[in-house]
Image (tube, grey):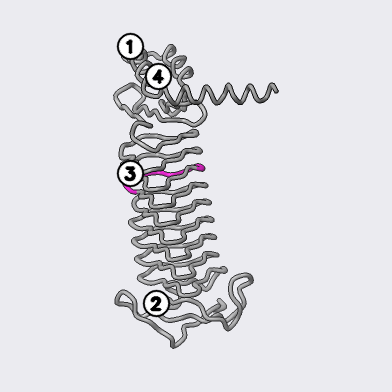
Amino acid sequence: MQKKYKLTDTKRKYNGCWLYQIEALIDIPGVVAKGELGGFIEAEGKNLSHNGNCWVGEEAMVLHDAIVAENALVTDRAIVGSKSTVFGNAIIMGDAVVLDSCQIFGNALVDDHALVSYDAIIQGNARVSGSARIGHCNILDNAKVYGNAFIQGNALIKGSAEVFDDAGVGSGATIDGNAKVRGDICVDSPIYIGGHADVAEHADCFTVGFMDYGTLSAFRDAESGVRIHYADTLFTMPELMNFSERTDSDIDRAFYPFLTKYLAEKFAPYIEEAEARRQSQNSNRLR
């Protein structure tokens, strides 16, 4: 195996560890030229693989059994430690910190002042930036978490969903589709929010979990006013009413009229807003 870097005599102490600056022994196209200095690692072969195009650059530091492999890049002033792994084409940059056995891979990007810790998994084309705090959760697909958002508690952020501002998500919640969770809301129940959801306060979502098919979630939706997730299916209000007519459960049949009335009243402003928007769009098409 050809070595692509070596440790230099330049060192610094961080968090009780001596870290050594690396120097490239070969050209890595688009990454570093032979002879250029990189960032700091604790031990050769331990923190940065000699295989692939992976690299630790600028003032970045990798320590404490953390591993950078394949084509991953850790650069700027980023820090990766505590048994975390960064691989695939993932990039950790800015002043981002990744700790505590996290996995960052695929084309994932962690940037700015983001903190990723406690077994978090970020993969696909997911982006975590700003001053976001991530832990005990999964960020997948094309999802974005930024601003001062806080994700924890086995939450799942996927699809093209976005969580930002001061929003918090936890307690097994799933944010999916093109949903946006924003403002200073804290979503702390095992709710499903998807579709084109626009959730900024607690009045924008609702969940109940005592029917035949498990938890029902309802939330403000930018297209239809309200969407309902139930029995692993995403419904509009008319679709839910049609589904209720086909249920085999006497309990559910008795409960649906109450439920649909409650949801219609709770989300009435959003439903009216969505309907007005549709009528305006249709009018514009006819002109």
**What residue is pinned by disc 2?**
42
Q: CA distance from mark 1 to mark 4?
A: 17 Å
**What residue is pinned by disc 4?**
264
The nearer-to-camera label among 3 and 2 is: 3
- Decide which of tag 3 and tag 1 comes sooner along the chain: 3
Give the answer, above or below, for where 168 lies relative to 242: below
Image position, residue 117 (x, y; %): 35, 58
Q: Quadrant of the N terminus?
A: bottom right
The nearer-to-camera label among 2 and 1 is: 1
**What residue is pinned by disc 1?**
254
| Residue at disc 1, secondary structure | helix
Q: Residues within 10 Å of mark 4 (few under 14, many from 20)?
A: some
- Decide which of tag 1 and tag 4 comes sooner along the chain: 1
- Residue situated in front as seen by the camera: 244 or 45: 244
Give the answer, above or below, for where 68 lies relative to 264: below
The nearer-to-camera label among 1 and 4 is: 4
Whether residue 29 is in magenta: the answer is no
Image position, residue 277 (x, y; %): 55, 26
Looking at the image, do the residues carrying marks 3 and 1 touch, with CB atoms under 8 Å apart? no
What amino acid is at disc 3?
A: Gly
What amino acid is at disc 2?
A: Glu
Q: CA distance from mark 3 to mark 1?
A: 32 Å
Image position, residue 237 (x, y; %): 45, 20
- Decide which of tag 2 and tag 4 comes sooner along the chain: 2
What amino acid is at disc 1?
A: Ala
Which region of the structure is painted magenta? Answer: 152-160
Looking at the image, do the residues carrying marks 1 and 4 touch, with CB atoms under 8 Å apart? no
**What residue is pinned by disc 3?**
170
| Residue at disc 2, secondary structure | loop
Q: Quadrant of the C terminus?
A: top right
